[in-house]
Amino acid sequence: MRRLLNHLGQAAVDLSAKPLRALLYRRPSEPQTIQVVFDQSIYLVRVRRHRQARRYTLRIHAATREVVLTMPPRGSVKEAKAFAQKHGGWIAARLNRLPAATPFVDGTMVPLRGADHRIVHRPGSRGTVWHEAEPDGAQFLCVAGKAPHVNRRVSDFLRREALRDLEAASQRAAQQLGVAIKRVTVRDQSSRWGSCSSTGVLSYSWRLILAPPFVLDYLAVHEVAHLVEMNHSPRFWRLVHGLCPDAARAKAWLDVHGTDLHRYGLSGGGADPGMGVTG
């Protein structure tokens, strides 16, 4: 009995020690999404509350076409709805400017390594995804299996190709700089093309396989150079340009065409990660 009372007493102390702010800002069940009506169209906006937010902000995230409204801790859902509705025209205009979504289906043109490849569904064939080329230079990604699996199979194929190319490019840069890489991964990153940890783990967007090879090589050099300089100092850029003469060209290519890469393999479209409005 004494042990039980001691346990309950300790639990009471732990409970009372919870930060007052956490209890103060707790809200009853709030809607995860709100609707914005503009020009006879309805747009879904995901609502999230952030403890460091100082005002209401709207953003459209890359690779998901998702509209997100961030609320300050003391904000209200009513005010959030009014803010989103006030900017309904902004939401509609930005979404309409985005490239049309291009799912991986029969007939879709995919810029594998910057070169157009047409997806050809071969339901009667064995295998998964393979490359074919015609004498006239036309290139194809042939996909076996049932139609509902084409999008996933092409996505998986492109991720494998991206990982292979990025591992090779990263290892080349690492050998030149005399550093060691622990691991290379690919993800569908929406806010950056690559990242580097101090432990030697490199992560890239698989969508770099859709860009010309000189762009992928530049990103690999960029991230590996961070294993020498974890910053963007003049010394860092000297390392990058020393290993990658096409660095400026690659950066310019991404500035012009980077957003377009996010539309491939989607059913709902891509987005510009820099889009945002604050109020």
Image (cartoon, rainbow, N blue to C red):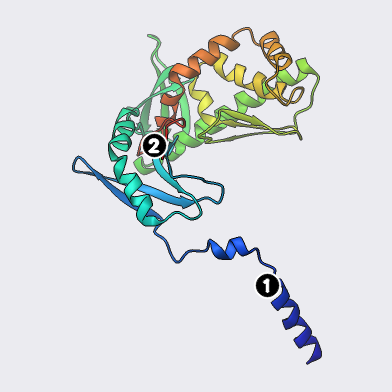
* Residue linked to disc 1: 16
Q: Percent x, y for residue 189? A: 53, 35
- Looking at the picture, tell me which residue is in the foreground, 228 or 102: 228
Residue occupying the point 71% across, 34% down = 197
> Which quadrant of the rendered structure holds the N terminus?
bottom right
The answer to whether residue 214 is above or below residue 140 is above
Q: CA distance from mark 1 to mark 2?
A: 48 Å
- Looking at the picture, tell me which residue is in the foreground, 16 or 38: 16
Left-right relation of 37 to 273: left
Residue occupying the point 44% across, 19% down = 257
* Kind of residue at disc 1: Ser
Left-right relation of 178 to 173: right
* Residue linked to disc 2: 266
Residue occupying the point 39% across, 42% down = 67
Residue placed farthest to the bottom in the image? 1
* Kind of residue at disc 2: Leu
Secondary element under disc 2, as helix, strand or loop, is loop
